Image: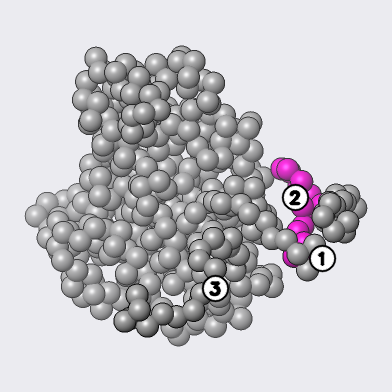
Amino acid sequence: MSDQRVVITDESSGKSLELPVIKGTEGEPTLQIKALPSTLGYFTYDPGFTATASCTSKITFIDGGKGILRYRGYPIEQLSEKSNFLEVAFLLLTGELPTSAETEDFEEDITYHTMIHEKLNTFISGFHYDAHPMAMMAGVVGSLAAFYHDKLDMENPAHRLLAAKRMIAKMPTIAAACYRHHMGWPTAYPKNSLNYTERFLDMMFSVPAEKYEVSPVAAKAFDLLFILHADHEQNASTSTVRLVGSTGANPYASVAAGISALWGPAHGGANEAVLNMLDEIGDISRVGLFVDKAKDKNDPFRLMGFGHRVYKNYDPRASIIRAAAYEVLEELGASDPLMDLAMELERIALEDEYFVTKKLYPNVDFYSGIIYKALGIPRSMFTVMFAIARTVGWVSQWLEQEETPTPIGRPRQVYDGQPARDYVSVESR
């Protein structure tokens, strides 16, 4: 809170109110409007919460105009180049990068909790074979409280941290189990000798019939993707986790709600939508036609993977993942017509005045689907990959909220329905 005040006056009543200005370490100053309804009798109207700060946080900073993304102050460019996913997870959870000893202890803790209760595998087997993996994920994660209720005292910081570690550790195991159920494969258990991403790939793709060798290219690519997707400030799914958590609900229920929010095609499903769009375009010769369709306000077609709710500049994650996409395809010796199509679409869009004026730059979803496809991940699992990574951000945000007194989330509304009216009997209607 700063000493600055902004005074607003209601001309109809002549009443005035001083609104305190909240200034964070960085970012725009924010008005504290708590006293507005009681003093002047007004609420604020902000559909989609585009101009509303719902909390204070020390975890992630975004400057959409400058294309900046930082975790706990560290630029995403540095973390993606020099760090690894579990180190970033420790950073998001605790606020600092781990020492060598802390790294070893944290990796050991995560490895220890990668197994899931065997009854959870039975639970997963109860889903229809073609159930969407995100439906299974939401159901299984929500049920974790029934299996791990022994240390679920939310007033106890040690219990809260244990729940967070459990979810980070178990999410890849659950995701792989859901995939294998869909494929009709037997359960693959986590191998403690492998690191986080290697273990996940082994659980996904190993089969009893032959030895599975984890591709270093795939493991490296997944580690990068998980870092880039680990947290992104108060997006729809993170806000959902915080809102559910504000009720006092356990973290498993809160994260299950976040998974459901992430499932939406406008949020976590965007990378799958990008590939569907590229399939629809079909050939490089048709890119110009679809760019024109995207510019036609009377045409419902829209380019997926371009623009971002927050970034009004190039998404900093997109440039990192673009380079990774090229590297993965080159190292795997894969030639993907969709990648060629995507590059031509990107080239035209970045040069077209319409897209430049509207600052519709490629975002992280534009390239991530291409990488997942090259690594053999089916499209139905794309959002699940996102959920594995974002679990770190969800539990970090949930922990932060639990550490400070937070009122239950309760947005208001503008009612524009029928005014008061009397009941009419069925005979008179």
Nearest to N terminus: mark 2 or mark 3: 2
Is residue 136 visible to us here?
A: yes
Q: Position of residue 269 (x, y in %)?
A: 35, 47
Secondary element type, mark 2 = strand
Specify the farthest residue to the front. 428
Q: What mark, if any, has residue 420 been given in the picture?
A: 3
Q: Which residues are magenta?
A: 18-37
Label 1 and label 2: CA atoms lie apart by: 19 Å
**Image height of 192 relative to 145, above or below:** above
Say whether residue 30 is magenta: yes
| Placement of the N terminus among the 4 image quadrants | bottom right
Residue beneath disc 2: 30
Q: Position of residue 160 (x, y in %)?
A: 55, 74
Mark 1 crowd level (few <14, some 14–19, many ≥20, 10 Å Cα): few
Residue that appears at 76% across and 46% down? 29
Residue beneath disc 1: 39
Dot in front, 1 or 3: 3
Secondary element type, mark 1 = helix
Label 1 and label 3: CA atoms lie apart by: 27 Å
